[in-house]
Amino acid sequence: MPEQVAGEVYDLKKTAQQQRNRILADSSMSTEQRIAALQSVQTETDAAVAARLGDRAYQQYRTGSGRWIQSLGKISTPSAAGP
């Protein structure tokens, strides 16, 4: 991946994670609103990364280092299993 493109993807990741953190911290949103907002961030980020990498490189990236994109749209919950 060219250095410039890598920098752009890194910036997209940083911005998306900041948006995700703001959404999760927003106590005025319901769970459904948070999920919808997170999925929107994931969809927008996914499209932006794909546009920068191109189809073939994007598919390889998404199944490797780009797994973070898939986690953007999920609300993490503590495990119910316990110790």
Image (cartoon, helix red, strand yellow):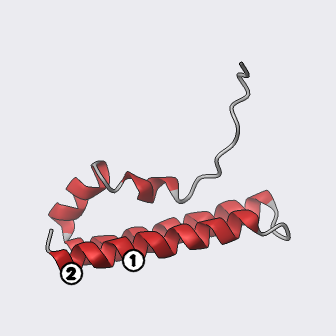
- Residue 53 position within the rendered picture, expressed as x and y whole percent measured from the top left: 22, 71
Crowdedness near tag 1: few (<14), some (14–19) or many (≥20) residues, C-alpha within 10 Å: few
Q: Nearer the viewer, residue 83 or 69?
A: 83
Q: Residue furthest top?
A: 83
Question: Does residue 75 sit above or below 49 in this rendering?
Answer: above
Instruction: Give me the disc on residue 54.
Output: none
Label 2 – label 1 distance at C-alpha = 11 Å
Tell me if 60 is positioned left or right of 71 in this view.
Answer: left
Quick one: label 2 or label 1, which is nearer the N terminus?
A: 2
Q: Residue furthest right?
A: 28
The reply to whether the C-beta atoms of the residues labelled 2 and 1 are less than 8 Å apart is: no
Q: Quadrant of residue 5?
A: bottom left
How many numbered marks are there? 2
- Residue 61 position within the rendered picture, expressed as x and y whole percent measured from the top left: 25, 57
- Residue 70 position within the rendered picture, expressed as x and y whole percent measured from the top left: 45, 54
Residue ID for mark 2: 4
Instruction: State the residue at coordinates (60%, 64%).
Output: 38
Instruction: State the residue at coordinates (70%, 37%).
Output: 78
Secondary structure under the numbered disc 1 in the rendered image: helix
Instruction: State the residue at coordinates (69%, 42%).
Output: 77
Residue ID for mark 1: 11
Residue type pointed to by label 2: Gln
Quarter in which the C terminus is drawn? top right
Quarter in which the N terminus is drawn? bottom left
Question: Does residue 8 sit above or below 1 in this rendering?
Answer: below
Instruction: State the residue at coordinates (64%, 47%).
Output: 76
- Residue 9 position within the rendered picture, expressed as x and y whole percent measured from the top left: 32, 73
Residue type pointed to by label 1: Asp
